[in-house]
Image (cartoon, rainbow, N blue to C red):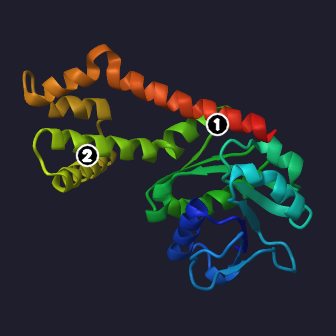
Amino acid sequence: MRLWLIGCGNMAGAMLRRWIDSGVVAAVDVDVVNRADRALPDGVRQARDLPEGPLPDLVMLGMKPQQIDEIVQRFAGRIAGVPILVSILAGVEEMTLAARFSAGAVVRAMPNLPVAIGKGVVALQSDSAGPDARAAVAALMAPLGLVEWVEAKQFDAITALAGSGPAFLYRFIDALGAAGVSLGLGAEQAQRLALATVEGAGLMAAASDHDVAELAERVASPGGSTRAGLNVLDQEDALAGLLRDTLAAAERRNAEMAAAAR
């Protein structure tokens, strides 16, 4: 598959490296347009403009959402007729993309940062892509982690949960370690323990036949220390309410960006 990437920052760069490392894409088949050179895998061509010659199999938009008007002005004509256009622009809807770019199929993708190690989540959405295009995009995304097709009305919620979710978990890990420090642990040791605890618990949950709510109950013995801590988290729905508010704020911001992009 020949790819053109318009913008290749942290997220698009993580995706590209994983694609090349997994063998699903060859570096020599990739052209990247960036405002300034970035560290990219050997063999990937990087320039300020798109190459001459025939269109690739797929173009991916990986710049900042706020740059969409500039990119339309510069490149919409050049990529007109590309078989598949994939966008990882948060908050930019398919109909907005389809109105600005001419492509056989337009697919929105929302990856999260663990795609860099093949443990990410990629949500995909398209009303214009047929079976062949959907299969091609799904195959491209497969090395990145869990791939889920969703409906357009679900996309902002998926973005809030999975796209922003790693940042929220990093905050939790940091807070868990800080709480350990408050009990007398050294800061570096507390962070190591917090990170290892979350990593192990996540792997165990992924491999378990039980849902995570049940796993929590299995750790907590009646009248024990874990139960005492869970009682704090559960009091007045404290943790669940906080996360609902967190995701709702992220979802609202996605909706605001979609409105601005229209």
Q: In this view, does 140 lie to the left or right of 225?
A: right
Q: Which residue is at 20% across, 56% downward?
A: 188
Taking the view exactly as shown, the residue that stands out farthest to the left is: 223
Residue type indicated by callout 1: Asn
Mark 2 or mark 1: whose residue is earlier in sequence? 2
**Rendered position, 244 above or below 106:** above
Q: Mark 2 points at which residue?
A: 201
Residue type indicated by callout 2: Ala
- Looking at the rendered image, the disc whose residue lies closer to the viewer, 2 or 1, is 1
- Local crowd size for mark 2, using a 10 Å CA cut-off: few (<14), some (14–19), many (≥20): some
The circle on residue 13 is none
Residue 239 image point, x, y percent: 34, 26
Q: Nearer the viewer, residue 260 or 213?
A: 260
| Quarter-of-image position of residue 70 | bottom right
Q: Is residue 53 left or right of residue 25?
A: right
Taking the view exactly as shown, the residue that stands out farthest to the top is: 236
Q: In this view, does 85 lie to the left or right of 254?
A: right
Residue 255 image point, x, y percent: 68, 33
Q: Which residue is at 17% across, 42% downward?
A: 180
Q: Can you say which quadrant of the picture contains the N terminus?
A: bottom right
Q: Mark 1 points at which residue?
A: 254
- Local crowd size for mark 1, using a 10 Å CA cut-off: few (<14), some (14–19), many (≥20): many
Q: Nearer the viewer, residue 161 or 258?
A: 258
